[in-house]
Every structure is written in C-alpha cells, then in structure tokens.
Image (spheres, rainbow, N blue to C red):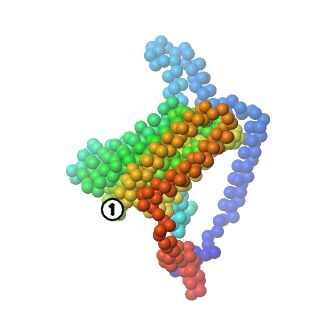
Amino acid sequence: MSSLRMGKQLPERTIPRALMALGALVALGFIAVNAAIGYVVIDGRLDGQWYDVRDLGIGVQELREWLDDRNADQPGFLDFLGQHWISYAVTALLGATGILSVVGGALLILIWVERRLIGRMQIRRGPNRVGPYGLLQPIADAVKLIQKEVLMPVGADKVMFFLPPALIFIPMIVAWGPIPWGPQMSYLDVHVGILFLIAFSSLTTLAIFMAGWSSNNHYALLGAMRTIAMMISYEIPLSIALLSVVLLSGSMQLSTIVEWQSTHNVWLAALLPLAMFTYFFSSTAELNRTPNDIAEAESEIVAGFHTEYSGMKFGLFYAVELGNALFVAALTATLFLGGWSLFGLEEWIPGYLILGAKISAAYFLLVWLRGTLPRFRLDQLMKFAWQFLIPLSLINLLVVAAQASIFARWEVEGIVSLGLFAIVNWAAAIALVREWASRMGYRPEREAVRQPILTQGVGGLQAARRLGSEMGTRA
C-alpha cells in the first residue's frame, strides 16, 4: 500500500521494531498481571478486603470507619461539627479528586480521539503532526488558547459576560456525582438521582443564555434563544423516557437501577428500545452536537452563543461540550446498558472497567453521528420533538406503566415476563415509528432510489482508489 501527498507516491510508514518489542512486553506484562489477579479472585483472598481492586468503595468505607474511631475522643469545642466530620471531609475530598481526575484526563484524551475518529470517517488523517500520531495536539491547542487575547465586546455586560464560562462548568462536574462505578463506588448515591440529574443539567441553559444575552451581539443572542427553544422542547421527551426507566425498575436511584438490571440479567435497552432512542436523540439536542447543533450553526450564526468569546473562555465552552457528551454516554451506559454489571463478569473484572468500556461504546456512537450526519434545520428539529418524540414517548410511557403493574403482580419467572415485554416493546416501537412517520408525510416507497453518483465520481473511497491508480500509472 502507498499514500499520496502533493501528487507524489510515498511509501507507507512502518512501526519501529523497538516500539513493537516494547508493546509486546507491555502486553505480556498485562496478561501476567491479569492472570495473577484471576488466581487471587478464584482463591477468594480479595473478597471484602480493603485492597479489593474490583470495588474501590470497600477501601473508602474502611478508611471512613478508621477515621471515625480516631475521632471518637475529639475536643469538646468541636462537637458542633458532629462525630463524623473528619471522615466525611476526607472521603468527600477523595471522591471529588477522583471525579475531577477521571473527567479532566478523559477530556484531554477525547479531543485527540474524536478528531482522529472523525478524520477516519471522512477519509482524512486527523491530528498527526504534534507528537507521535498527533498525541500532543490537545496540549498544543491548550497552549494556543492560553496565549490568545481575551476580548470584551463594546457595550457588553462585563459581569454577565465573564460568569458563563465558569458557571457552565459546574453542572457538568456535579452531574457525575450519582453515577455508580461499582456496588459501593458512588460519590452521591441519592434516592432521587434521576431527578437530581435532570435538575442540574437544566442549569446549563441559564449559563448559555447569559453568554448570548451579555455579548451585545445579534448572532450570539440568536444562538442563545435557539438553545432555550431546544432545551424546553427536548427536556420533555427526555424526562418521559427516563420516567419509563423509573416505572420499570421501581426506583430513581441510579445504583438501584443498575442492581435491578444485574439481578434480572437484562439490559433496559432490550426492554425499552423507544425510551433509549428518545433519550439518546434528545441528549444530542441538549448537547448542541451534530446533527442537532442548531445553537452553534456556523453556516448561519457564526458560532452561536459563544461568538464573542476567545482564548480559554472559548476553550471552557468546548471542554464542557465534550464533558457533557461523555456524561450522556455514562448515563446511557448506566440506565440502559447495565452500568458496572455484565452478567456476572463483574466478579472477575472491576466494575469501573466494565462501565468505562460501555461509556466508550456509547461515546463512539455520538462521534459516529457527528462525523456522518448533516445538520437539521431549526424547524425540522422542533417539529421532530413536538410532533414525533413527545407523542410516541407518552404512548410508550402508558405501555411501560401497564407492563410494570403486570410485572409486580404476575408470579412467573422473570425471564418469561421480561422476554414477553421485550418482544411487545420492540414490535410496538417499530409499528409506532412507521405509522407515525407515514402520518407525518414520510413515504419512502413513493420516491425513486438515487444512486450515490457524487461520492463515486468525485469523492469517496472508489474515486480515491481510481486517482491513486492513475497517479501510479503516470509515475
């Protein structure tokens, strides 16, 4: 194989043998460590111990009890703080540090991963100049943004203009609190977890509207108003989809929802296909990502609500967009893909690694959508929410409510009832989508199928191969 650059045929790059040898050694070490961990797990030496790497929450619980014992004889003037203030402060600091470290590290990596993936999907290389395979590109981008001048529009409200880049970062970080990474690995395991997440995710709308309103720019104001319209429109089907999950699992606590899926050995994605699609599509609208990035449509309103922001202020908006996309992937994996459980494999593999793999798969789907689909028009997006998603979500909610009532009273094996529910829900979802789409005017059988002439004749893989063969013949 060969590559083309500036009309010349160049040999393909090869991986150095030293790097291949290093990779082989790392792989052998990884296999050896996993074999040792598997032996210890089979032997039962890790069960319930503080050093059990399958659930880091056990070690945190041991630390909390140890700190409570040391704090039993605290001075009297500290009694107003309570008997557990030290353990609470230390474990809260550890959890917050863990969340910030994981999210912050992921944001640096995802910048490179997303650009490389989209590059491959669009038949280009992506970042490949700064560092090996372009791995240092996120650091170069951060340095560039730090060096850029921070501008203030004439006539802008200074206080409201400076606040949004910081305010928009808070809901994204706080929303990670209720996500369970293991049986005892949840920073904020509240009983109203879903309601908590819906409430905090809605705060992003206020920061975006502040950014657009305070910029004294018509494009920014239009982008902010579009965001308000999208948020209000898609919060409704999103909430209805999550309510279906609550009805079937019987709880709003995220850890309980994961345990319900683990107990019944089923993913809610198999039982609630329409609810999962509604949640996922509505989330892309609230994320302002393609194909629903109407608030930042550069072909219409420059950059939308953050048109006037430069330097690291723009960088914060960009980082929050990636962080929110990662959080949507995490919530999708938790609610619909079983979270940290995997049909018993969590006894061998740490739950947080299982959840990380599911988050990666869901995030890849978000990147795939961004790299392939065109942007919807604003009227199309609003029509899809009010005339398609909301009515179908309400019908699906009634069906799920009836199934939840039957499941609570029907004394049969779970595999029987849940299997029937899955068949009914998939059939109902397909029938409802087809019937509702036809009523809205979508009838593909009446339209002639067009062949992809443009991609075959002008661009695409076939045209690229033909061009490569022609250049090779000329050489």
Q: Position of residue 208 (x, y in %)?
A: 34, 47
In the rendered structure, which amino acid carries the disc numbered 1? Glu
**Residue 341 seen in render:** no
Quarter holding the C terminus? Answer: bottom right
State whether residue 154 is above or below residue 17. Answer: above
In the image, farthest residue toward the left:
155
Q: Position of residue 291 (x, y in %)?
A: 44, 58
In the image, farthest residue toward the top:
76
Please name whichever residue, 457 or 99, is drawn nearer the observer in this view of the structure. Answer: 457
**Residue that badge 1 annotates:** 300
Graded by Cα atoms within 10 Å as few (under 14), some (14 to 19) or many (20 or more), the crowding at tag 1 reads: few
Quadrant in the picture for residue 469: bottom right
- Residue at 37% across / 45% down in the picture? 232
Q: Is residue 158 left or right of residue 67?
A: left
Q: Is residue 393 left or right of residue 208?
A: right
- Residue at 64% across / 68% down in the picture? 14
